[in-house]
Image (cartoon, rainbow, N blue to C red):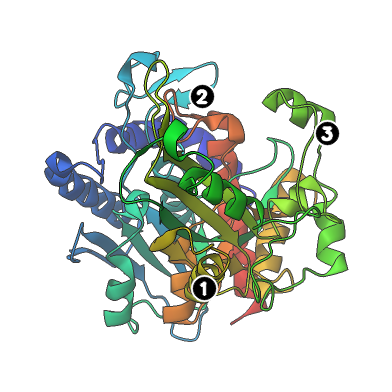
Amino acid sequence: MQDLKQYIEDNKQRFLDELFELIRIPSISSKPEHKDDMYKCAEMWKKLIIAGGADKAEIMETEGNPVVYAEKILDPSFPTVLVYAHYDVQPAEPLELWQSPPFEPEVRDGKIFARGADDDKGQGFMHTKAFEYLVKTNQLKCNVKFLIEGEEEVGSPSLPKFCEENKELLKSDVIVVSDTGMIAPDVPTITTGLRGLCYWEVELTGPNRDLHSGLFGGAVANPINVLAKMITEMVDENGHITVPGFYDDVIEVSNEERAMMAKAPYSEEEYKKALDVEELAGEKGYTTNERTGIRPSFDICGIWGGYTGEGAKTVLPSKAYAKISSRLVPDQDHEKIAELFIKHFESIAPKSVKVNIRHLHGGQAYGCPIDLPAYKAAEKACEEVYGKRPVPVRSGGSIPIISDFERILGVKAVLMGFGLEADAIHSPNENYPLEQFYNGINTIPYFYKYFAEMGK
């Protein structure tokens, strides 16, 4: 692939022009008024993939926004790669914080500034250009399928059913995703794990109405006091979650992978300084990066009750509320964990209050073994471009559809992203460095090369 860099150099402006046309479509999935934009964006993706060399591409309906499916089948004996990306984006508000209009892409300081520049139009677009290069130079030795959805930013509610109904169409040997990031521009990174999620809302009710805290305080249980005490009991002094059975299915990461993760550049002092905290906290026996990647967590996301207005009001409240989340790791089942928490939380409640818990939503964790052939292919591809072995990273975040792919399609996904923390995804002034964009296009063809050499 000696001509790959030259191909990128010769087509840089065209690549940007095409990407910018895609970005200008405000495909915001969370806003119903942008429904027409979802179809417009899907049409643009279809056009781009066909132009890149696909044999066919079509827009397929789901119960929500449409998906774009495309394929190029060279030989049934070749391994098949399914490329997943999403064309929907987050809302751009607050608009006044953008230095340039969010849907008018602009290059400043070597970066593309726009909503979707990184997440995920920029990163998904890299795959179409890598595919285009391989097709036009007759170097593609894999069958390729594309699945581009329009609901990732709202939880991909329609995609699991679509996958169930189209298993044969989506049949592949590996799924490749660029919707994650790198530790630093010079530190290639492959995300080997995503945490799952459970989310609950808790309501505690004490007396049947708000009471005068002078007349009733000390005689009637205060639901806020009770809730605070119950929450405190959920994590012990070693940072260990106390729900019985919570850790039963947790997969312990191998010493080899922990050693590789430890090679990631990290300064605890800089980490604390950036957050303006004097001390970190978490489960005993694990580093900060391990706590956010390979271990589960338990957090109160919101708590309220009683009087919170201006000034004082001497009230003993009738109710107290909390929103609680737990990040999960392989092989914890989010539905099982949801029930374990509800059972335990109800069991530790005193009779002075009534407990009502709603399980709002959840998703499975995902893990990619570092000895997987497709991982090895991605690893070699990164080494080819960056000159160093990529660092495996367990992300603290969640992309529930990735675990759904494995459950429904029976295929592992390789998460080979090129975004950076500084890209401000989901925030005003989202951006994507041109260097990362072009390096992604440069790296992906090598993945196909090495994966084809390894066979199915």
Secondary element at image label 3: loop
Determine whether 178 is above or below 6 in the image. below
Left or right of 223 in this view: 289: right
Using the rendered view, name the quadrant where residue 456 is placed.
bottom right
Q: Residues within 10 Å of mark 2 (few under 14, many from 20)?
A: some
Residue nearest the observer in this picture, 313 or 431 = 313
Q: Which residue is mark 2?
A: 111
Residue nearest the observer in this picture, 445 or 115 = 115
**Residues at circles 3 and 2 in contact by the CB criterion of under 8 Å:** no
Determine whether 319 is above or below 371 in the image. above
Q: Residue at x 58, y 44 (%)?
A: 418
Residue nearest the observer in this picture, 60 or 447 = 60
Using the rendered view, name the quadrant where residue 271 is placed.
top right
Left or right of 408 in this view: 257: right
Q: Which residue is mark 3?
A: 267
Q: Which residue is mark 1?
A: 343
Give the distance between the C-alpha atoms of the residues marked 3 and 2, in whole angstroms. Answer: 26 Å
| Three-letter code, disc 2 | Lys
Q: Is residue 143 visible?
A: no
Please identify the quadrant where the N terminus is shown: bottom right
Q: Earlier in the sequence, mark 1 or mark 3?
A: 3
Q: Residue at x 28, y 34 (%)?
A: 21
Q: Earlier in the sequence, mark 1 or mark 2?
A: 2
Q: Residue at x 66, y 56 (%)?
A: 233
| Three-letter code, disc 1 | Lys
Secondary element at image label 2: strand
Residue 45 horizontal/vertical position (percent): 28, 50
